[in-house]
Structure formats: C-alpha cells, structure tokens
Amino acid sequence: MRLPRFEYLEPDDLTQALDMLASHKEDVKIIAGGTDLLVRMKNQLLTPAFVMSMKQLSGLSYIKNHDDTLTIGAKTTLADIVDSDDIQEGYTALAQAAERVGAETIQHHRGTISGNILQDTRCIHYNQSRFHRSGRQPCHKDGGKICYARDEGDRCYSTYQGDMAPALIALEAKVVLSKKDGKRTINLSDLFTSDGFHPFSIEPDELLTEIILPKQKNNSKSAYQRLSYRSAIDYPITSAGVMINSKAEKIKKARIVVGSMSRAPLFMVKASETLAEKSLTDIDAFKEAAGIAMDNAGTFAVHNAGSTLEYRCDMTFVMVLKALEQAAGIEK
Amino acid sequence: MIDTGSTIGKSFKRIDGVDKVTGAAKYATDLKFNNMLHAKLLRSPHAHAKVKQIDAAAARKLPGVKAIATILDVPKVLQYWFFLRTPKKEKQIFLRDNVVRFIGDPVLAVAAVDEQTAEKALSLVHVEYERLPAIFDPVEAMKETDIKIHERGNIAFQVKKELGDIAAGFKKADVIVENTYHTSKQKHASIEPIGTCIADFESNGKLTIHSSTQLPHWSQHYLAGALGLRLHKVRVIKPYTGGAFGGRCGVIHGLEVMCSWLSRETLQPVKMSFTRAEDFCATETRHPMMIKMKTGATRQGVLTANEVEILSDTGGYGTHYIGVIADCMSTGIGLYNIENYQFSGKAVYTNKSMCGALRGYGNPQMNFAQESQIDIIAQKIGMDPLQIRLQNYRKKGEMDPILNERILSNGLEECLQKGAASSDWKKKRTRQPDKDYIKSGIGLSCMLHGTGAARALPDPSSATVMINSDGTASLHTAAADEGQGNRTVLAQVASEILGIEFENIEVSQPDTDITPLDCGTHGSRQAYCGGLAVRDAAMDARKKMLVYATEMLELKKWDHLSVKNGVIFETANPGNQIPIEEVMRKTQIGDMGICRQIIGTASGIAPAMPGYYGAVFAEVEVNTRTGDVKVKKLTSAFDVGKAINPDFVEGQIVGGGVMGIGFALTEGLQYKDGHVLNPNFTDYRILRSCDTPRIEPIIVESNEPSGPFGAKGIGEGSMVNVASAISNAVFHATGVRSKRLCITPEQILQGLAELK
C-alpha cells in the first residue's frame, strides 16, 4: 500500500508552523512521530493535501519542574517520559501508560506525548483498507450513515484507545492549544468531544504545544493499568488511570478514568466519589468503586475492538481494581 | 554408505545468510525488467454473486493501460498440480466461471505502466453483479441444498475408513470420552506476502515466470496446460522467498495465470504483487475444522477404539481439501496402535477465502482433538499422560495401516523421556501451590508426521551435480528453499559424498530450464527426498571422477579409492593421492585429450514416507482474573532421523513452536458477513518476540534407514502438537478443558465460572 499524494511542509519554528496551520486549516495534518497518521493515510482513511512535520520545531521537547506544576512539551517522546524521575515518582500513572504504548522499539522513540493524546478513535470496522471498505455502504466515520459496530447506531461509536489521556485526566492535566494569534489552556478532559466522528475540540488552526500537570497536595499516588493481548503493539481493549490523594491513610480525593471503552476517556465521577474518606486498605470500597466504574463504562462501549463486549466490561472492573490497589500500595 | 564425518551433522552457516541480512538477496518483488508493466486485480466486494456484465471500456481508454483480462477470458479448468494415486488418476482443478465465491475473489486484472495507473483503471471498471445468498457456516453449507456454491453442491469431498470393529472396540472400553473440537482459520503470515509473479511472454512463444512459488515444476506444468503451451516453452524461475509455510504450494488464486495472460496480450513483462491485505483476505489459509471424536480405553490405559468425524471448511474453492483430510487420517491413525478405528471426513465449500496447505496440513487440527482426548482419558483413569502415550504409540517394526509401510525408525520414546527429564515433568505435574490468582500447569502431547508424500502422490526429486575443472562443483536442484535452509543442507550432502569442501559447492535456484524435475517443497520433504536425489547424483559424479583417478593413480578398481577435502587417495595407501582439481583439469581441459565434463545425475521417488515424531511439553501460567494464558516454556523433542545441520533443525523446532503458540492462543481470521476483520498485523496477532517464551529444542536421532545419512523430516511437525500441549497444560493449571482454538481469555473465564 502506498501513501496517497500530499505536499510536505516543514516549518522552521513554531511561528511558521502556526502560520501554516492558519492558512491551510482542515487541509493540513500534523505529523509528529507518524506512527498513527501514516497507517491511516496508507489505508486512505485520510488523504490530506498537506502534511506538516514538527521535525524542525526545537524547544517543544522538555519536561520542566516548576513550583506548582510540571510541564511537558508536546514533542516529548514516550521514551523521555518513561525515563523521567520526576514523572516516575510524582506521576506514576503517566510513566506506566507511556511504557505500555505500542512497541518499545518503534513508538517509544518516534511516538510523542501529543501524538498519542491526539490519536484518532478506532473501530475494527473502519480502520481497514480501502478494498475492505469499498464493498459496503460507508459508515458514519467514513462519511456515511451506517454503524457496523452497533445495530441502528445513529452516530459513530469508534473507540478512543490512547493510553496517555486516561492517565493524564486522572492526574488533572491541562493542555495548551496555540494558534497564530494566541493560545488557550483547557482541561485535557475538555479536549474530547465524545463524538467518534470528530473526537477532539481542537480547532484546525491550533497546535497542542504543552501539557501541564498540577502538583497534588497531600499524599498523592497514581497508577495505570491496561489490558491487551500481546505485551507490545496491541491497543488496549480496556484501561484505567487512577489517582488517590490521601492524608493519614484516609482517601481525600480519588479520580478514576476508564479508557478504551468509549469515544473518549471516561472520568467516572460516581465511582470516584464513593472512595472519599475511605481507608487506603479498604479493599471492599475499591471493589465497589470498580464495580460502579464497570457498570457505567459498560453503557458506552460497543463491540468494535476485537474481543467480546462482555469481556471488556468484566475486565474494566479488573483494571480499575488493580490500578486502585496499586495506587493505594496494597497490590497483591 | 559414505560418511567421512566432514559435513554431516555439522551446523554450517546458511549459504544465503549474508545476502539476506545485507539486503543483497533479490526477492521476486525486487526484480525489475525493461518495459515491465504492473498488474492489479479487481476483487469482488460480494461473498457470493454472479457476474452479469463487466464494463471496462473507460478503463481501457485510460492512458497507460495496456491490457485487461477478465475471469470470462482466462482458462476455466486446470490440471491439478498433483495427480492423486486414485483410480481416477488425473485430477482437475476448477478455476473460474462467472461466479464470485468470496469477498476478494478476483474478477478482472489490469496491466498498466505503473501501479497507480492500474489502480486508477480499476476504479473505472463497472461490474454488474447479481447477488446470491452466501453461506459462511460449514454445517449450514453441508445441509443446504438450494444454495449451491459450486454446481455439484457444497460437499467437495468425503471419505470413510474403518479398521477393526468399532462397536467391539467400544464394548471393550471402560471409559468412553466424546467431544467436539473446533479449530481456527490460521494464516501463514510469512514475512514476504504470498503472491508475487512476473510473467514475460516473448514473441517467440516462450513464457518465463519469476514466481515466489514452492513448486516451480508444478507451476510450469499447470501453466503450460492452461495456456496451451508445451513444457519447453514455459520456464519457471524461483528467486529468494521470504517464507512459505504451504502458502505458495500450488495455484495462487488469480496470480500466475492472470499475469501470463496479460503478458501474452502485451508481449511485455507483467508484474503482479499482492499486498498484505490481499494475502490475508484472498490467498489460502488453514482449513478450519469441526472434529467429533469418541474415544474408548480400558482402565489399564489400552486405547480400544476411536471414532472420528471431521467437517473441514475449504472456503470458496478447493485445492488441497482431499490431501488435508487424508493427512488427518494417516497421522491420526498412524501415531497410536488403536485396533478399532473409524474415520470419516467431509470437506465443504463456504463463501470465505479458499483453504489450502499450511504447515502441518490437517495434522494440527486432528492432533488437537486426538491429543486432548487422550489427555482426558488419562485423567479419567488416573494415569500419567506420559505413560498412556508410551503404552500406546506405534513402535518401530510395526506396520502403519494407512501407508501400508513398516516403521523403520521411531524415536518417540526417547523424545518423551528426554523432554520429560528436561522439563522436570514429574515434579511439575504434582500440583504446586498457586501464586494467588495465577495458576500454573504443564501439559504434553505427541505427534507423527509423514516425510514427503510418496505414498499419496507422485513425488519426484532430481538433482544434477557438475564437477568443474578446478575441483569445485555446481549442484542443480529445484528443491525450492523458502528460507528453511535446504539448499545449504543439500550442499552438505553433496560435499560429504564428493569429498569436495562445502564452500566449493554452489547450489542453483530452481529454474525449470536448467534444474531437473522436482515436485517442489512441501510435506517436510527436502532433506529427505531432495537429499536422496542429491546423494545419488553425487554418487554418480563421484564414481565417474574416481574412475578417471583410478587410471591416473595406476590402480585397477575405482572403489579402492576414497575422497576427502578435495583429495582422492587409495584407501589402503593414503599416501598414493591426487587432488580432485588435477583430475578434473586433466579430464576437462584436455591434458589427456579427452575433454569430459563430469556430470552426475539422479531422479526418482523416495522409497518410503517415513514418519517423524515429536513430544512437546508446555508450561503455562493462567491469570484467573483476566483469563490470559502465558506460555512460560516449551520443551520440544523431535526425532528427525539424523540432523544433517543441527542449527537448522533447532531453527525449525523453535519456529514451529512460535507458530504453534499462535495457533493455540491468538491466530485466526475473524469474519463478519464474509469480510475479514483482521487483515493486518495489528489485528491478526502473531506472537511478538517479547511474548515468545523460551523454547528448548531437543534433537533425537533414530537413524531412518531409507533416508540420506539417516535423515527424515522436521519442518511441519514442529508446530503440529504445540496447541494440544498448551491446551493440556491449561487443563492441568485450571481444570478448564478447551475444545476450541484459539483458546481466548473469554473461554478461560467462562470455563472457570462453569467449574464453580
């Protein structure tokens, strides 16, 4: 399979990059590592007129420790995140998520944090060759009106299977979106639209330039768990990012985020709230929270990630529970 | 037998190794020719439909398009590449009519100046289809009478065989176990996608084909038949190939015939190369099978009866469906001495991609069922699974009732004993306390696989050895090397016999203009069948060489001479010697005025189809929370007769182990409404190196008397009993008995829930 024709843009600096985005808007796709984009282009799921490389943009690859925050440049590779002591210690879930993306030899050195965050939603019925898609009516994501994953599906139910976002949302991350005339900072959770067809609220002329992680008060621990068939390459079929803030062995705040079960990472509000004021060793409370998370996530999921829906739901419970046990330091 | 100990049993480096790792080796897709056109196939988007009309007028007008061939133009029926030894003698293979039978079935081919133009042309073709109801389920296909996938119905083939008295056998049994097993539609997943061909039809009527085939001569035969050419006008050359595993074993649907047709139309070379997605969706796969098995045994562990009923799903077309079922029968019956055996098999058509040969050829499916049954029986009567196998296997000296051959070598007992010792079977079989939710277990299984196919079909091998005037030799053989290393092994055989150093022997690639008839590489046959031909050809050349040397050394009888390391000497008086180089220079360049090129040649069919044997011990850990099965270690002991090159044998054992774990746990095409959902390496999960456990190869050498230096096969067998060993280990770990491959996490969790 060959790449469709496109014009290649290689801006020298951020200003030039934002100018190019401003003038080409929807016609341009940004390539950072390319591990997600190029596969889509080969399958002709995307045929952008312009592909803009971030190669020459220096100064977007960093991990900086500030008084109240930790900031990560958009071009930072997954390998750098795994290697960072600051992240390993203060934001364990993020390091664990980076470690599990793709294959170490490819994605960890080519793949970037922003590329992983902005990884498009996937569906086993859509992420296929043009030949496969040519023999049938186009689905919602392909510009049609049919869903092959859910009977009578009235919209696109493709699944967000990125690893970094569930961990980052559990850690209350914000992202900086830059454009020609300025920039805005939003909660990472607000970057997701919950629309499978158009999963991100980023504007065509905007570039994700930075990720901001707040410094948590109290004793804060986080963990990320994901399930996939093989230990490399595979996208998760369900995942959980959790953060637990505690004081004197009592949970003050918990955040449970479930990934790979819906069009966006799911912040499980109800499940998270049940853990307030619970003891760090209260395994029954963790089980209850995991059960609620499983039930709530299950309502969003459709059969489009290769294994049965029932199994993915059951495993959501297992992943959330494992992540909570790990963050609470009581993992078996 | 000559055995100087110079080359046999030594792990020489493969002769093409450096070329392959440096990228110098040319594969079919690397080849380029002047004026070469590129061809692409238009494939059916429907699982079952009649092609009413093809409108290609707009495509023909597209600049750069040189020729178009539709399924209505090309030959409909081919002489099959093998002619079964049945009363019917000759078999025909049905190729095409105006019906498409699976999604991806070729409808039309375009040849154009480049790939992009060919692709563009395809988008301009309009095909009018009449949709027909499609059948995907083999059970449904068997019962269905209104929807016929082929004119004569949906049952492609059926066979029944009975040994002894099955009813009496069950009467003698204390335990009877009855189960139904299912296996998946596994793909070869060779590193080079299946399906590349360059056809070059010249104006003098000669067709040259460069194809990544396993069977160059059979390609030559069927293409000549299809195109109405004589054999001397069809030349098939096989360049380097990136793995085959049976996928290049016969007619590749829509490839060589279409390419040749387009080249004849244009008189230009035409290249067609399938993408990975085309390979996954539209070339042959393993036959998925449903196997019902009823097995009886006494309390003492004597297997008294086995009743087997196989339903094999051959997909939209059939090529190997007869052989695959025959292999289920011969391997199943051959392995154990079960007096009363009833075997019946049916192959049916469905509207999915066609099935064919894949490493093991029916045996892995049959083995999964039979080795599971024996494990269940052992458990029911409280016998060690190792013991029940030792007690029942067919030993050396016994008759194989299907092949009607006496077993001349069988190292299965040694395989079992060595494997058990090395895997610490006894200790691990006693239940260990589990680590919380992780349960561990060990299981074993055995297998028999035939070497070659001399009892089933014509299985010729030939070789020619030419000794050059400087004492080097050229070996000409069409024993296609798909990457397993048989060219190197055959060079070792020639080297040993000729007494010419290994590095002074060059081995050709298959080229039907030059290399003599060989049915190609299938059935684990080349070390054995190819080895016999090379041995005999080398013996012929050796004798001729020694006859000249006898004269030069002023001796009387040529067989008083020996040859080693390039020097011929009097056996009784080694000081009386002459280098081969000198003999050759004198005979060929004409110091003696004779100018004789020494050529040795041999051809024939192997005298037997010796079974090779193996025992695999699998250790697993099952995560009872996620249902995930991790294979921790395989100990694979195989009786290969004699390992001519031990490194290559170990390579085959390890490679087969990896493929076997995939067959057990993750591999298989998934379908929805006839569409393959996983035609790529993201979704079709072959094991990655980080998931591959330690595989310990153990070589057992039973010395097969009919083989070259005692050798027999290994290539396929090494994957055959891996899945059954893993399944038996999963049972040992968890008590869950899997009857369906792949063993998915869902299946494990469901099984655990049912046990509660």
Image (cartoon, coloured by chain):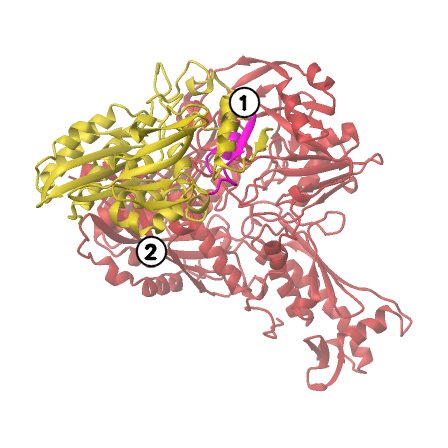
The amino acid at mark 1 is His
Residue picked out by circle 1: B150
Residue B389's label in the rendered image is 2
Q: Residue at x 81, y 83 (%)?
A: B554
Q: Check if mark 2's residue and mark 1's residue have beta carbons within 8 Å.
A: no
Whether residue B92 sits left or right of residue B206 in the image: it is: left
Residue A306 at x, y = what percent? 37, 32
Task: Please indicate, yes or no, whether residue B747 appears anywhere in the rendered image.
Answer: yes
Q: Residue at x 85, y 66 (%)?
A: B596
Which secondary structure lies at badge 2? helix
Q: Residue at x 51, y 63 (%)?
A: B647
Please state which of residues B511 and B403 is positioned toward the viewer in this rendering: B511
Please give the range of residues in magenta. A35-58
Q: Are marks 2 and 1 on the same chain?
A: yes
Instruction: Please identify the quarter of the rendering in which residue A272 is found.
Output: top left
Q: Which chain is red?
A: B
Please identify the residue farthest to the front as the structure is shown. Answer: A181
Q: Which chain is indicated by disc 1? A: B
Quadrant in which the C terminus of chain B is drawn: top left
- Whether A232 is drawn above or below A27: the answer is below
Residue B53 at x, y = what percent? 63, 13
